[in-house]
Image (cartoon, rainbow, N blue to C red):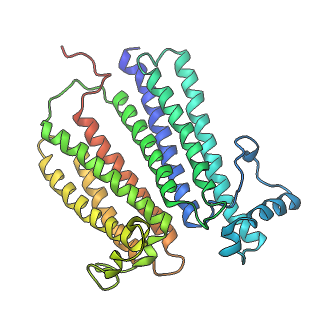
Amino acid sequence: MSSPDRLRPVGWWLLLVAAAVLLQVVLGGITRLTDSGLSITEWQPLLGVIPPTTDAGWSEAFGKYQQIPQYQLLKSHLTLEQFKVIYFWEWFHRLWGRLLGVFFVLPLAVFWRQRRLEGMKARLLGLLALGGAQGVMGWFMVASGLQDLVYVSHLRLAAHFMLAVVLLAALVWEGLALLRPTPPRVPPQSLTRATGALLALLAVQLTWGAFMAGLRAAHAAPTWPTINGRWLPPQLFEGGWWWNVPLSVQFVHRTLAYLLALALLGWWWGARRTLGLERHLVLVAVLAQVTLGVVTTLQAGISGRLLWFGVAHQLLGLLLTVALLAALRALVPSRYAPAAA
C-alpha cells in the first residue's frame, strides 16, 4: 500500500470525528435554547453516564435543580415531567461528548499500532488534549450558573463554543490534508491571505453569535431591516458595559453579518480563476446563512419559534466555516503531499 493510501483511512476518520463534533455543537445549541444546561448540577465524568432510573433518583436530581437560582427565580413552575425533558437534553449533550472521546481514542490506538501516524502523532495527541479541555470548559461554563446567575455566563458560553469551533476546524484541516495530498501549487498570495482574514472575521462573528445565544439577544429586536424601527437605536448607548447589553450585541452581530457577506461575495468573484467547487460552496453557504439569519430574527418574537431556527442558523454558520476552511486548504500545500517530480 502506497503512502497516500495508508493515510486515507486516517483522513476519513478525522472527518467523521469532525462530523460528530458538529453534531455535538448542535446538541449544545438545543441545550442552550431549551434552557437545559443547568438541569444537571454536578460533574460526574463516569457516573454521569447513567441517568436516574427510579422515582427516588429523579426526585433527588430535581431537588438539586430546585436549589439553584434558575429554578427559584425563573423555573419554579416546572413539574417533574417537564424537568425530565430539559434533563434529557443536557444528559445527551454530555453523553455525546463522552462518546466523542471513544470515537477518537479507539481508532487512534488502532492506527498507531498499524504505524499509519508517522509524523502526525503530536498533532493528534494535541487534538485529544483539546477535546479534553473542551469538556473542562463545559463544566466551567455550567458552574457559572449554579450560584448567582440564572443562566450561564455568556462569556464562558462563547469560550466553550469557540473551543469547539477550533476543534472542528483542526479536525477538518488535518483530515483534508490527508485526503487531498496534491502536489504543491502556487495560488496568488493575496487570495490566500484574504481567505485567512475572512476566516478570522468569521470567528469574530461566531463569537458574537454565541453572545447572542448567551444573552438571549434575539428577543431584544425581532425586527428587520431596522432594529425596533430605528437604524441606530439610542438604547445602544445606554447601560453598563456595552457587551452586556443584548441590543448592542445584536447590533454588532448584524453589522458584522453585512460586512462579512459583502466581503465573501467579493472573495467569491476574486477566486474565480483559482478555485472551483470550494468557492461555490462558500457562496451558497453565506447566502443561505444571511437569509436564515433574517428569518431567525423575525421568528424570535414568536413563542416557540426561536429554537429550531436558531439551531439551524448556528449549524449553517459552522458549515460556512468548514466551506471556507476547505477553500483555504485548497490554497495551502499539504504537508503530506508527495514530492514534485
Tell me: residue 66, above or below residue 179.
below
Q: Residue furthest bottom?
A: 229
Which corner quadrant of the image does residue 67 belong to? Answer: bottom right
Is 115 located above or below residue 65 in the figure? above
Give how far across and how far down residue 160 sits, in percent: 51, 50
Give x and y (percent) for residue 71. Answer: 70, 70
Q: Is residue 205 above or below residue 4?
A: below
139 with respect to 188 (left or right): right
Judge whether residue 75 can be spotted in this image.
Answer: no
Q: Quadrant of the C terminus?
A: top left
Q: Residue 33's x, y, as percent?
A: 54, 66
> What residue is shown at x 66% (from left), y 61% (from top)?
147
Quarter assignment of residue 260: bottom left
Which quarter of the figure is the N terminus placed in? top left
Give the tally of numbered discs.
0
Considering depth in this image, is 304 or 212 the residue closer to the camera? Answer: 212
Q: Is residue 277 above or below residue 265?
A: above
In the image, taking residue 63 as reference, residue 139 lies left or right, namely: left
Which residue is depicted at the point 31% across and 56% down? 285
Left or right: residue 317 compared with residue 231:
right
Residue 74 lies left or right of residue 274; in this view the side is right
The x, y position of residue 112, in whole percent, is 53, 18
Q: Is residue 328 visible?
A: yes
Picture quadrant where residue 290 is located: bottom left
